[in-house]
Image (cartoon, rainbow, N blue to C red):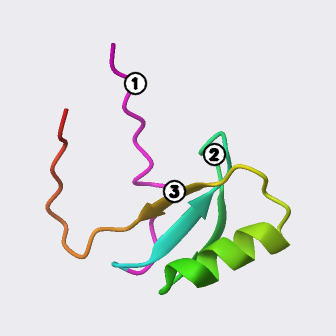
């Protein structure tokens, strides 16, 4: 069984394309974002987020969902 797909597009508004993003474990808020993965991981640790969800904002507006 597949996990439900959650639309976080509104949450990511204003985050630059190509940026790495650390979300809270419940995916309800942005903890940090940065151009480099190491930077966003460091910021999440500094924010004491124990299990951040790390994603990268696509460079283009086209999206593909692979199942």
Quick check: is 59 in the magenta stretch? no
Nearest to the eye among marks 3 and 1: give it: 1
Q: Is 63 situated left or right of 4 in this image?
A: left
In the structure shown, which secondary structural element does the residue marked by tag 2 occupy?
A: loop
Percent position (x, y) of residue 38? 58, 81
Q: Which residue is mark 3?
A: 11
Of the numbered discs in the image, which one, if any, rests on residue 51? Answer: none
Task: Tell whether label 1 touches label 2 (CB within 8 Å).
Answer: no
Q: Is 62 situated left or right of 35 in this image?
A: left
Nearest to the eye among marks 2 and 1: give it: 1
Quick check: is 5 in the magenta stretch? yes
- Residue drawn at (33%, 13%) of the image: 1
Mark-to-mark CA distance, 3 and 2? 8 Å
Q: Quadrant of residue 48?
A: bottom right
| Above or below, 30 relative to 38 | above
Q: Residues within 10 Å of mark 1 (few under 14, many from 20)?
A: few
Q: Residues within 10 Å of mark 2 (few under 14, many from 20)?
A: few
Q: Magenta part of the protein: which range?
A: 1-16
Percent position (x, y) of residue 45? 78, 69
Q: Quadrant of residue 44?
A: bottom right
Q: Quadrant of the C terminus?
A: top left
Q: Quadrant of residue 46?
A: bottom right
Of the numbered discs in the image, which one, if any, rests on residue 28? Answer: 2
In the structure shown, which secondary structural element does the residue marked by tag 1 occupy?
A: loop
**Sequence-earlier tag: 2 or 1:** 1
Front residue of 58 and 10: 58
- Residue drawn at (66%, 54%) of the image: 52
**Sequence-earlier tag: 3 or 2:** 3
Q: Which residue is mark 1?
A: 4
Percent position (x, y) of residue 37? 51, 78
């Amino acid at each position: 069984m597949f996990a439900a797909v959650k639309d976080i597009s509104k949450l990511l508004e204003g985050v630059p394309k190509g940026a790495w993003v650390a979300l809270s474990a419940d995916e309800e808020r942005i903890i940090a974002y940065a151009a480099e993965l190491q930077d966003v991981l460091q910021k999440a640790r500094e924010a004491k987020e124990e299990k951040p969800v790390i994603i990268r904002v696509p460079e283009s507006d086209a999206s593909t969902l692979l199942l």
